[in-house]
Image (spheres, rainbow, N blue to C red):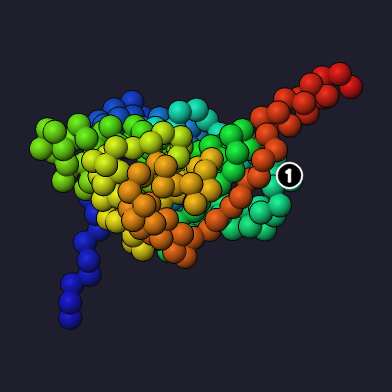
């Protein structure tokens, strides 16, 4: 017959000694939530007459929940959004291309997991950047690696990396992202070198990882940005294949929001 498993050894500790042991162990194991919540949760589980296993489940769940919240905040910070924007603060009622069901679908981020592009087209002030940041924020809060950058800033970064012989490292950083949120395509013309470097990033992510971009120029006008018509056509081809294309229109979102705010304060 096999011997019965030995019971784990348990050391009798006073409450102060137990508190010190918990603090030391949590510090060593990097469990800050358990370190702060072990005592209060112990008191709560004692009042509720829960089992030791239930108490253990409570403290572990608290640590997991807090760690997940910290990870979400870290992902949003790493995305380098220029300002906070959220989907619940966006009024899409004036955008016929964006009915509630479509916006809700985009908010889930399934298109990111599928590596599908998103293109936001419309005049200045129609909500493109708000949507780009808000969808990127939702993706980051869901745990995805996101980076927001303007087209000009990305091109400058790539040129500097190339000059420092660090281009492959820079391209690798952008290739590992789950979502690249690329703003202001078409705002400035790119020199041939910058356009080719940007194309390298787009090609690296093609059909594998999502790019969400915003532009105030229609696709037919992108030749002015990329100067080389063939390169412009290749960029459009890659950013529109299996893409979600949303036209935000010509009506200024900022103007509507300002008028609505003023109207609310006068009623």
**Residue 70 appears in view:** no
Q: In this orientation, which residue lies closer to the viewer: 167 or 169?
A: 167
Q: Single out the residue that lies furthest toward the bottom.
A: 1
Q: Tell me where residue 70 appears, x and y as whole percent.
A: 41, 37
Q: In this view, does 145 lie above or below 31?
A: below
Considering depth in this image, is 178 or 164 the residue closer to the camera?
164
> Would you say residue 84 is visible in this rendering?
yes
Identify the image quadrant of the C terminus: top right
Q: Which residue is drawn at 22% across and 70% down?
A: 4
Label total for image: 1
Q: Quarter-wise, where is residue 134 in the image?
A: top right
Residue 188 falls in image quadrant: top left
Q: What element carries label 1?
A: loop
Q: Where is residue 113 in the image (x, y as percent from the top left)?
A: 42, 60
**Residue 57 rendering spot, x and y as whole percentages:** 43, 50
Residue at 34 percent across and 32 percent down: it is 153
Query: Where 181 falls versus 53 (above or below)?
Result: above
Q: Is residue 153 rendered to the left or right of residue 161?
A: right
Q: Residue at x 17, y 81 (%)?
A: 1
Disc 1: which residue: 94
Of all residues, the one furthest to the right in this rendering is: 267
């Amino acid at each position: 017959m096999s011997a019965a498993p030995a019971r784990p050894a348990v050391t009798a500790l006073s409450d102060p000694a137990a508190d010190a042991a918990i603090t030391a162990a949590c510090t060593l194991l990097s469990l800050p939530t358990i370190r702060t919540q072990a005592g209060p949760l112990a008191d709560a589980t004692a009042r509720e007459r829960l089992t030791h296993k239930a108490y253990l489940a409570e403290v572990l769940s608290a640590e997991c929940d807090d760690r997940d919240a910290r990870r979400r905040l870290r992902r949003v910070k790493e995305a380098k959004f220029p300002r906070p924007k959220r989907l619940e603060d966006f009024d899409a009622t004036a955008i016929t291309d964006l009915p509630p069901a479509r916006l809700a679908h985009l908010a889930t981020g399934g298109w990111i997991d599928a590596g599908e592009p998103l293109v936001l087209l419309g005049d200045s002030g129609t909500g493109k950047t708000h949507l780009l940041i808000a969808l990127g924020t939702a993706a980051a809060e869901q745990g995805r690696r996101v980076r927001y950058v303007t087209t000009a800033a990305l091109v400058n970064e790539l040129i500097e990396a190339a000059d420092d012989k660090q281009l492959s490292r820079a391209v690798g950083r952008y290739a590992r992202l789950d979502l690249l949120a690329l703003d202001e395509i078409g705002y400035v013309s790119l020199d041939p070198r910058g356009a080719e470097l940007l194309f390298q990033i787009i090609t690296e992510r093609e059909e594998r990882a999502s790019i969400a971009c915003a532009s105030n120029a229609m696709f037919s006008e992108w030749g002015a940005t990329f100067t080389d018509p063939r390169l412009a056509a290749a960029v459009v081809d890659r950013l529109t294949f299996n893409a979600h294309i949303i036209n935000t229109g010509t009506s200024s979102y900022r103007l509507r929001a300002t008028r609505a705010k003023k109207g609310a304060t006068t009623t």
